[in-house]
C-alpha cells in the first residue's frame, strides 16, 4: 500500500509541476515544485530500498518486481544495490 501511495503522490506532484509556466519569472515556483516532488519521491525510494533488504514482502518475486520498478523509475540500480 505504501508503494502505491508514494507512487501516486510522486506522479501527482510531478503533474502539478507541469502546470507551472516555463518562464523565468516562475523560477522560484519551479524550485519549490522540484523540492516538493523530490521530497515526496523519497517515499518511493524508501520502499524500493526496503525491497533491497528483503523487508517489503515474503514473496521474493513481488519484492523484486516492486523494487526493480521503483528503482528504475528513480534511475537507481536495484540488483547491483
Image: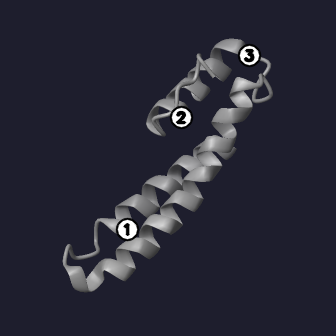
Q: Is residue 60 left or right of residue 16?
A: right
Q: Is residue 19 above or below residue 10?
A: below
Residue at 57% across, 23% down:
78
Check disc 2 and report the residue beneath it.
Answer: 70
Counting from the top left corner in percent of width and height, residue 74 is at 48, 40
Check disc 1 and report the residue beneath it.
Answer: 16
* Quarter placement of the N terminus: top right
Q: Is residue 23 left or right of residue 41?
A: left
Counting from the top left corner in percent of width and height, residue 48 is at 64, 34
> Which residue is more in the foreground, 35 or 13?
35
Residue at 74% across, 33% down:
50
* Quarter placement of the C terminus: top right
All told, the count of numbered labels is: 3
Within 10 Å of the Cα at label 1, are there few (<14), some (14-19), or many (20+) other Cα atoms?
Answer: few
Q: Is residue 31 left or right of residue 2?
A: left
Q: Is residue 14 visible?
A: yes
- Mark 3–mark 1 Cα distance, whole angstroms, equals 35 Å
Check disc 3 and report the residue beneath it.
Answer: 59
Amino acid at each position: 500500500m505504501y508503494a502505491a501511495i508514494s507512487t501516486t503522490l510522486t506522479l501527482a506532484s510531478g503533474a502539478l509541476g507541469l502546470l507551472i509556466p516555463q518562464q523565468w519569472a516562475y523560477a522560484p515556483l519551479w524550485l519549490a515544485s522540484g523540492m516538493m516532488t523530490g521530497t515526496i519521491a523519497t517515499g518511493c525510494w524508501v520502499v524500493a530500498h526496503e525491497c533491497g533488504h528483503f523487508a517489503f514482502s515474503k514473496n521474493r518475486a513481488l519484492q523484486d518486481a516492486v523494487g526493480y520498478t521503483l528503482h528504475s523509475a528513480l534511475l537507481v540500480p536495484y540488483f547491483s544495490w
